[in-house]
Image (spheres, grey):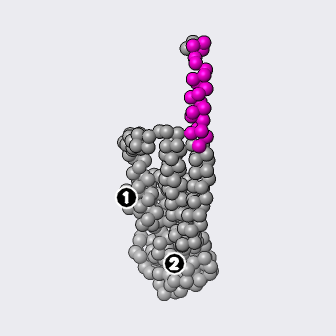
Amino acid sequence: MDLANIDLGALWNTLLAWAPKLVAAILVLLIGFWIVGMISRMIGKSLERSGIDADLVPFLKSLVSVILKVMVVITAAGVVGVEITAFAALIAGAGLAIGAAMSGTLAHFASGVMVLIFKPYKVGDLVDIQGTVGHVQEIQVFNTIINTLDNKKVIMPNGIATSGIMTNLTANGKLRVDLNVAMPYEEDFGKVQGIIRGALDKVSERLPDEPTIEIEKFDENNVLLAVRPYATDATYWDVYFNSYKEIKKALGEAGITVAYPARRVKNI
C-alpha cells in the first residue's frame, strides 16, 4: 500500500465519526460486565439463602453470568452499528458448527445438569461408578471428580458416569462390613459367637446396630463364620481392621486356635 496516496483527512473524519460509538461500546462492556458481576453475586447469595443444594449454586451462577454477558456483548455490538439480526445469525451459525463438533462434550454437559437436578450422588458421597470407588470431590459442568480409596484422582466425564449402574454407598447412611472368621469344628458355636460379639463391642468406630454373627459354611478344616458389623462410609476401614484385631485378640485370650491344613509325608 502506498502511504502517500492515503487521504489522511478522510481517515481522520472516519475515526471521528466512529469514536463516539467505540467509546460508547467500551463503556457498555465495562459497565455491563460490572453489573453482571453484581447480579451474579446477588443471585448466588439468594440461592444460598433459599436452601438450594450447594452443588447447584455455582453452576446456576455461572450459567446466568454467561447468558447476561452474551447479552451485553450483543448490546455493545448494536451500539457500534452492527446489525443485531446479522449478529444473531452469525452466533447461531457458529453455535451450530460448534455444537456439531462438540456433540460429545454437550452430552457430558447435559448429563451434568441431570446429576445436579436428580442427585444420584452429591459432593462427599462414597460411590461406585463404572468400577471406580471413591468419594465425590466435585461435580463440574462436564466432569465428576472422584478421589478413590487409594488416593487417586479420577476425572470421569458426566456422560460416562451416568451411562451405567451407579452405586451410592452413602445414601442409606450406613454400610455393612463383611468379615469372615474361622472356628474349629470342636468349639461350641454359641461360645465363639459370644466372644466375637464382645470383641466387636470394643470397636468404638462401629455403629450400634446389632452385628450378624452366623455360620456361613463348612470348609475342610474349620467352620467359616459370617461376621457383619455396620459402619459409616467414613469409618468403614477403621471398623474393618479394628474388628479383626479385636477378634484375634479375644480368640487368643480364650485359647481358641484356628486349624490349618496338615500335610502327611509318606515314607517310601
Q: Is residue 237 visible?
A: no
Where is residue 223 shown, x and y percent of the image? Answer: 44, 76
| Quarter of the rendering occupied by the N terminus | top right
Q: Which residues are magenta?
A: 3-24
Q: Which quadrant would residue 19 be assigned to in this image? A: top right
- Out of 140 and 155, give the one closest to the viewer: 140
Residue 246 in the figure: left or right of residue 116: right
Q: Does 150 appear above or below 244?
A: above
In magenta stretch: residue 170: no
In magenta stretch: residue 6: yes
Residue drawn where x is 54% and y is 73% of the image: 51
- Out of 16 and 218, give the one closest to the viewer: 16
Numbered label attached to residue 200: none
| Mark 2, residue position | 229
Where is residue 93 shown, x and y percent of the image? Answer: 38, 40
- Out of 188 and 32, give the one closest to the viewer: 32
Residue drawn where x is 52% and y is 70% of the image: 52
Tell me the mark number nearer the camera, choosing from 2 and 1.
1
Q: Does 133 appear above or below 30?
A: below
| Mark 1, residue position | 164
Residue 113 in the figure: left or right of residue 72: left
Residue 53 in the figure: left or right of residue 88: right
Q: Amino acid at mark 2?
A: Pro
Q: Mark 1, residues whose alpha carbon is within 10 Å: few (<14), some, or many (≥20)?
A: few
Residue drawn where x is 41% and y is 71% of the image: 219
Where is residue 253 shown, x and y percent of the image? Answer: 62, 80
